[in-house]
Image: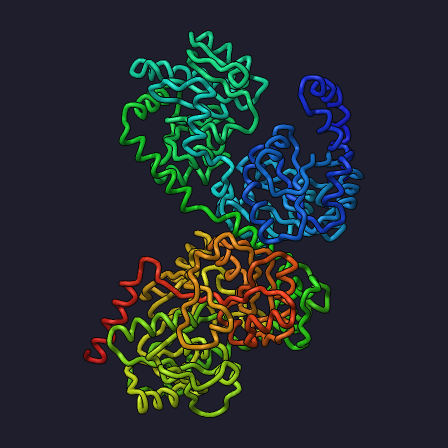
Amino acid sequence: MQLLYNIAAIIVVLLIIPVFAVRAIRERGFVERIRQSLGFVPEEELAKVAKKNCIWVHAASVGEVVAASPLIKEFRKEFPKSPILVSVVTTSGYEMANRIIKDADSIIYFPLDLPLLAAHMVRMITPRVFMPVETELWPNFLRACRTMNIPVMMVNGRISDKSVKRYHHLHSLLDDMIGTVTKFAMQSPIDAEYIIRLGANPNLVVVTGNTKFDQTYTDVSTKEKQRLIDEMGIQNNDGIFLAGSTHRGEEEPVLQAFKEVRKEKPNAKLVIAPRELLRVREVIAICHSAGFKTARRTELLEHPSEGHDIVILDTIGELGQVYSVGDVIYVGGSLIAHGGHNILEPAAHGKAIIVGFNMFNFKETHALFTKRSAVITVQNSAELTQEVVRLFSDDEERHRMESETLAICSENKGAARRSAILLHEMLEQVEERRLASGYIKSTNKVENFQTYFYHLIHSRKSHGLLVQMFIAVLYIFSLIYGGLVNLKLAGYKFGVFSRKKLGCYVISLGNITVGGTGKTPTAQLLAREIRNLGYRVVILNRGYRAKWRGEVGVVSDGKTLHMTAAEAGDEAYMLAKHLPDVPVLIGPERYQTGTYAIEHFGAEVAILDDGYQHWQLDRDMDIVLIDAVNVFGNGYMLPRGTLREPISHIDRADICLLTKVDQASETSRQYIHTVIEEENEHALVVESVHRPRGFIELADWHANIASEGIDVNQMKGKRVMAVSAIGNPASFEQTLANLGAVVVESLRFPDHHDYTEQEMLDAANLAVQMDAEAVVITEKDAVKVPILTRDTIVGKLGHMVPIYVVSVEVTFRDDADRILGCIHKDLKEKLGK
């Protein structure tokens, strides 16, 4: 099939040479396009990216360039040292990319997909990763990437109905293309379903959302909007009707609607933006035949004038901003069998939008806006006229639609950031990225093996036979482990093993996966809230990785810290630091630590931190935490995966708490809710977010309980380096980015890593080299970091960069009254208070 494709490609190129010759004469910039498409890329453009480990983003035309724009901004933040190359196919795409993409190091034309040419370009540039935007799959180019082991990640992936049918005819060629892609970041569940139907491994497919919701190049201030209106000579108007991306056969219905509007609003104006600039003369003739006076946008820029009825937009890449001047928008390509165009550009300006019934190329977006009555779909010319007239007459309905479109756009932002994090995880998975960078190397061989092992069990790439055999052995052990877990739990359920009961109310807080769900800050929140209700509350922690050995250890009596971080373990120490008036105890048997807490602190409520699997102690309430970002780990039980128990075991939970939902996609949240509904009908389902509370200098953080630090807003716009050794470092880095900090680099150590002073000094020194204004670590890291004062840093390095600890708190998302009310009601019934 590859041979047939190559023969066909060469024949097509030979046949269209005459067409190229004509276009070279008629179209400005077409000669340069052909030169570069044949591999003659300007040396100055190549020098910036070739052999420099660049990120290659391929966006075919204007639409893909718009989608790529926010992606490239996020890639620049995530990979500040990697050059970014953008390639396009069309002249309009090239002009658009140069106008709106400021973070790219180089912008070139994509090579023709001829066998030797594609391989030559891939070898010449040798990118770190190739990222086609939407559905830009080229067989020879992808084959070259596969040969050179260059990972491919599809971003903002979109597959139309037509594409599914068309691609199926490629047979083995399709299998090769799909098989080359390492990760599919798709716009919607429908697109994900389509790419899986075409043969993609479901484990490689992720729904990240549509990056066009994140675009900002169309942002227009009030002053800029007025400038556009003035330049187009339509200042004195009763309203502006705008028809964008119209095709042949659509201008007549638009003009008919405009005629009817003018009966009520004689000074109304119309702006038409033909999809193809070659049709401008044709569109002008149609407008004149309908009795209207027209003016071209380019002419008005040179010779301003007024008195025309219609402005013909004959510029490239300007429509996104010009949408801002319209009061009612018709998006073309939808009253004919083209499949419509993207409605997100006018939606970003909060416009009342009308489309035709042919929107099959944008099914998901159209369905989203239709469900919220934020777009009107018409079947024919008569309905278009009716709805345009109605919207110009009904201000209340028009304003409702405007508000709804803005709300939808706001709610669906974040796809670009999620894609950047996905890319980060794909390329620089924890230890590979840190060790490959050469900045800071861990000498702990155990940790390095743990990191390698973590990547091995999470990797979805093909491995050699020995590795596959090893993973198969792990899988067998996971089946054995899962069987033992089920057997042990059944023993407790049926009374084979006895449970002990404390003389106080017991809340178990835990998860069914290993690490990274946010148990510690959630335990802090619950302890504070229960204490504020008037109950004496204690926290019982197992003391993971604590150096202290014994039956009962008092980390804090609520007033004073009695242990160091090394003695207590990082989780228990963090809890103690943030909870005045709440004793924190550690010990392997929670019954013993709980009994001690009742006898010495009068405990009425005991919170078992990480206690969901501590079945030997009876509890009054079970709360299970589910990370909405890293949903159920990799789906396998230990040691093949990260599940402590089968997913079905959430049926024991009284409350299911989804954490970090602000960083998760809507699809992930819906999937978790669906799983909970299937496995646990009685549980209260609550969502929470992690919010930074303040930034505290490292030395101050170690000084006392409940340090406050500086306000989080003071980090906005500052260049920072993130250093972490936690279960989900990407979540921490996204938190900093969401605050407005510019993350110039991130160093990721294995979970629970014990830092040395030299490692932190190396990190501070690197931060200075990268012009960072601060190093930021998590509280979980802070307990493992030696105390470094300003004098220590300056004395060792000769310069100063502050090391801040970001203090994070959990807040319930619109559900605080539900979960706290549930706990309070149960406490009153069982404790009689």
Q: Quadrant of residue 162?
A: top right
Location of the N terminus by quadrant is: top right
Q: How is the image coloured?
A: rainbow
Q: How many numbered callouts? A: 0
**Residue sitting nearer the eye, 525 or 257:** 525
Image location of residue 338, percent across then percent down: 52, 27
Residue 811 seen in the figure: yes
Location of the C terminus by quadrant is: bottom left
**Residue sitting nearer the eye, 521 or 222:** 222
Image location of residue 13, percent across then percent down: 75, 27
Give the residue drawn at x 51%, y 34%.
361
Which residue appears farthest toward the left when viewing the image? 832
**Residue sitting nearer the eye, 477 or 414:** 414
In the rendered view, tell whether residue 656 sits above or below residue 248: below
Residue 473 seen in the figure: no
Image location of residue 74, percent across then percent down: 56, 49
Give the residue drawn at x 39%, y 28%.
354
In the rendered view, tell whether residue 36 sits above or below residue 298: below
Give the residue drawn at x 62%, y 76%.
756
Image location of residue 230, percent across then percent down: 44, 21
Give the residue drawn at x 73%, y 66%.
465
